[in-house]
Image (tube, grey):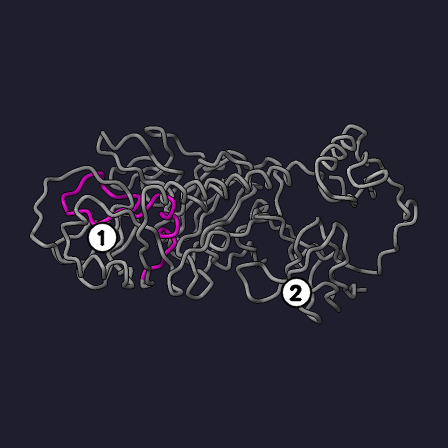
């Protein structure tokens, strides 16, 4: 058992998301940094879709009441097990009674904003509509359909079981870097209403830096930059949207839909952040700046292939290491 | 030591390359495979000069846990994992070895104080390469 010791946490249980339910008006939810979740699970020998705890606010503390292997990925947050410092992007062994503390994200301008705590076997919560992700808006899934709070008790499917620990990964931010002029970037497919915006606005979107404002969370990121002006006002009926869609409300300041986005909306769609780059956006801290890179369908598919190839390399190397004899013959 | 089947498999892989010599150092010993004659000729197992007399390791040395690239610091960190003169505990990672996306710790064999880095940051190393010399605690 694992007991949450932090009060104002906003931490949630997430897996890769509740796919295939948009037609019922149920959004996907799921880890904001899906690559960190997949990699943490691979380090533990878990299914890549096993549920983990996403931690966006620090410090965060919990206590292990049973021996349990765990992996820390996502933001590097100066984690400690009792007093011992822990390496990031690494699989560790906790013993019953030990306290895990996640501190403020490190790394200066390159820092992330969400730590992923993966547990041996995954967090044991019931599957709802095919997923263990917390659906905050609908108040179901995850742990009682809500963010974790002090005193909550979670169980890891694999607690008490032996697991290879004490190794790690080169984070994908280093292996698959993407920046423009030193600013983190994501690739964007122009969307249906893109041609309806002024040419100067379209140029400014690609050329400018966009600040992620304080009104940004798992539902969406509100950006601040040069306002995007439509050639003529666009009034639209509500229609289906997915995470990554960039809407432009009347203010001209874009909103990027994130994992907890509702599945429909009526604002004009300027573009869509490609699926392969949503993890980068998921780690972008409030107050930081991002750039957009225009991308074609083929480039978007190739980018997704690149992510899959990285995960395949990780899976192969981790499996090799996990199956190799342990030092000392144990 | 590798089983005969494993040695055969390694030999088959080697035969398909233009590599002349394969030296595999593992916790179980040293295996050497090479060509019997001219390039392109049959792969045979070669003798190991150090059989029975491995080089005596120095007093207290942290060694490479695997083939890979030795890094003094975690790739996300600027500060090295260990510094000469700063105490480390037994088993504490004092460096990492990078193999593709994988990072393996270089554990301190005993509690003590690092004296010298024997291999520069970013250099490829083989299994068992001495990396950091330590002064063990009494």
In the image, the segment drawn in magenta is A258-286
Please, which chain is the residue tagged with disc 1 on?
A
Query: Where residue A243 sits: x, y (%)?
Result: 28, 43
Pointers 2 and 1 in contact (C-beta within 8 Å): no
Label 1: few (<14), some or many (≥20) within 10 Å?
A: many
- Residue A193, position in %: x, y? 16, 46
Q: Position of residue A254 (x, y in %)?
A: 21, 55
Nearer the observer, A196 or B16: B16
Q: Could you tell whether A18 is left or right of A156 in the image?
A: left
Residue A185 place in picture, x, y as percent: 36, 57
Q: What chain is tagged by disc 2?
A: B
In this rendering, is residue A21 above or below A202? above
Circle 1 is placed at which residue position? A255
> Is residue B80 something one can see in this rendering?
yes
Residue bearing mark 2: B82
| SS assignment at label 2 | loop
Look at the image and say whether residue A269 sits in the magenta stretch: yes
Along the line of sight, the residue nearer the viewer: A91 or A201: A201
- Please identify the quarter of the rendering in which residue A316 is found: top right
Quadrant where the N terminus of chain B lies? Answer: top right
């Amino acid at each position: 058992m694992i007991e949450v010791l932090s009060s104002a946490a906003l931490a949630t249980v997430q897996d890769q998301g509740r796919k295939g339910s948009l037609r019922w008006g149920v959004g996907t939810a799921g880890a904001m940094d899906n690559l960190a979740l997949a990699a943490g699970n691979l380090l533990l020998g878990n299914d890549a879709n096993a549920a983990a705890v996403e931690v966006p606010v620090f410090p965060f503390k919990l206590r292990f009441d049973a021996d349990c292997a765990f992996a820390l990925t996502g933001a590097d947050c100066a984690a400690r097990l009792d007093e011992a410092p822990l390496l990031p992007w690494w699989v560790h062994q906790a013993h019953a009674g030990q306290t895990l503390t996640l501190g403020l994200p490190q790394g200066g301008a390159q820092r992330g904003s969400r730590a992923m705590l993966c547990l041996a076997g995954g967090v044991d919560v019931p599957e709802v509509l095919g997923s263990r992700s917390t659906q905050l808006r609908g108040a179901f899934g995850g742990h009682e359909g809500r963010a974790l709070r002090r005193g909550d008790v979670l169980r890891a499917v694999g607690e008490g079981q032996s697991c290879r620990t004490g190794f790690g990964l080169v984070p994908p931010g280093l292996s698959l870097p993407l920046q423009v002029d030193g600013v983190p970037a994501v690739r964007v497919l122009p969307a249906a209403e893109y041609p309806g915006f002024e040419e100067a606005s379209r140029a400014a979107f690609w050329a400018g830096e966009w600040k992620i404002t304080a009104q940004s969370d798992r539902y969406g990121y509100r950006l601040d930059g040069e306002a995007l002006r439509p050639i003529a006002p666009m009034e639209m009926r509500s229609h289906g949207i997915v995470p990554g869609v960039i809407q432009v409300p009347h203010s001209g300041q874009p909103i990027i839909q994130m994992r907890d986005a509702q599945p429909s909306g009526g604002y004009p769609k300027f573009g869509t952040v490609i699926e392969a780059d949503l993890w980068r956006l998921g780690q972008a801290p409030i107050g930081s700046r991002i750039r957009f890179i225009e991308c074609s369908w083929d480039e978007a598919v190739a980018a997704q292939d690149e992510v899959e190839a990285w995960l395949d390399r990780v899976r192969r190397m981790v499996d090799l290491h996990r199956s190799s004899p342990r030092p000392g013959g144990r | 030591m590798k089983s005969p089947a494993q040695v055969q498999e390694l030999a088959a892989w080697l035969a398909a390359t233009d590599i002349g010599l394969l030296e595999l150092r593992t916790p179980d010993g040293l295996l050497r495979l090479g060509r019997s004659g001219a390039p392109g000729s049959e792969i045979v197992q070669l003798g190991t000069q150090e059989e029975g007399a491995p080089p005596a390791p120095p007093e207290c040395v942290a060694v490479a846990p695997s083939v890979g690239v030795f890094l003094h610091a975690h790739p996300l960190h600027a500060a090295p994992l260990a510094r000469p003169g700063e105490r480390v505990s037994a088993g504490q990672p004092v460096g990492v070895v990078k193999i593709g996306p994988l990072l393996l710790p270089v554990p301190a064999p005993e509690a003590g104080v690092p004296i010298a880095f024997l291999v520069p940051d970013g250099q490829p190393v083989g299994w068992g390469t001495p990396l950091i010399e330590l002064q063990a605690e009494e």
